[in-house]
């Protein structure tokens, strides 16, 4: 039954039920369609059934980073923290936050063993130089790595390591080549 908005019936139905504005049809909540008898469940129409819940996604187990890579990652993370503690420059702090993301990308690649051994060796050389705060030597190893490897293999993390080395050299007053 269609009720015109503003009519006497519309106001009567508005008091007893609600008015569906989208269709301009009055829905009577006290009349369950049974000729003036209250609807089952206390005068309210039956609620629609919720859609079925999707099946839970299987839990994907992430393998750990191989133990022999942890010292290198720890040195890189410590270098980032050291630089963050030394600098007051907000731009450098932002760049160091980005470097943390690049180190996480390296961690993921190491986790799934998708970094070649020559690249891992150079990263260990860089970490060794960083451990002694020899930023010139670390930058040298970085340059050697960038020139000798397939860039697509290291593009996710090597630019971030370079930023770390440059900021570290600047903060520790090292003139790099």
Image (cartoon, rainbow, N blue to C red):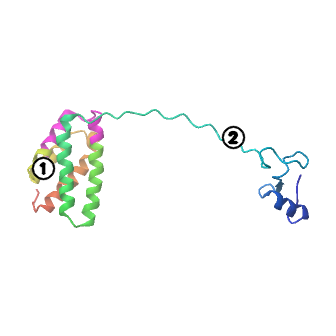
Q: x, y percentage for residue 118?
A: 17, 35
In the image, which residues are magenta? 107-126
| Residue drawn at the location 88% of the way across and 58% of the way down | 3
State the residue at coordinates (28%, 48%): 102
The residue at which mark 1 appears reads as 130
Task: Pick whichever of labels 2 and 1 is earlier in the sequence.
Answer: 2
In terms of image quadrants, where is residue 21?
Answer: bottom right
User: How far across and down, in percent of the image, does residue 164 sit?
Assistant: 20, 54
Res. 156 visible in picture: no
Q: Is residue 120 magenta?
A: yes
Look at 43% across and 34% down and name the residue there: 59
Q: Is residue 81 left or right of residue 60?
A: left
| Residue lying at 21% horizontally and 39% vertically, measured from the top left | 149
Depicted 97 relative to depicted 68: above or below: below
State the residue position of label 2. Answer: 49
As drawn, 171 above or below 42: below
Please identify, in this view, whether the residue under mark 2 or under mark 1 is nearer the observer.
2
């Amino acid at each position: 039954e269609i009720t015109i908005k503003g009519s006497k019936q519309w106001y009567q139905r508005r008091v007893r039920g609600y008015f569906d504005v989208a269709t301009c049809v009055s829905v009577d909540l006290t009349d369950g369609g049974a000729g003036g008898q209250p609807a089952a469940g206390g005068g309210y129409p039956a609620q629609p059934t919720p859609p079925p819940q999707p099946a839970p996604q299987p839990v994907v187990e992430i393998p750990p980073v191989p133990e022999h890579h942890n010292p290198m990652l720890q040195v890189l993370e410590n270098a980032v923290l050291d630089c963050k503690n030394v600098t007051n420059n907000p731009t450098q702090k932002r760049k160091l936050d980005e470097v943390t993301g690049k180190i996480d990308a390296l961690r993921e690649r190491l986790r799934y063993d998708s970094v070649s051994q020559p690249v891992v060796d150079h990263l260990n050389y860089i970490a060794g130089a960083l451990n002694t705060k020899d930023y010139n030597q670390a930058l040298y190893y970085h340059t050697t790595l960038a020139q000798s490897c397939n860039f697509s293999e290291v593009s996710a993390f090597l630019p971030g390591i370079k930023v770390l080395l440059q900021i570290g050299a600047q903060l520790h007053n090292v003139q790099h080549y």
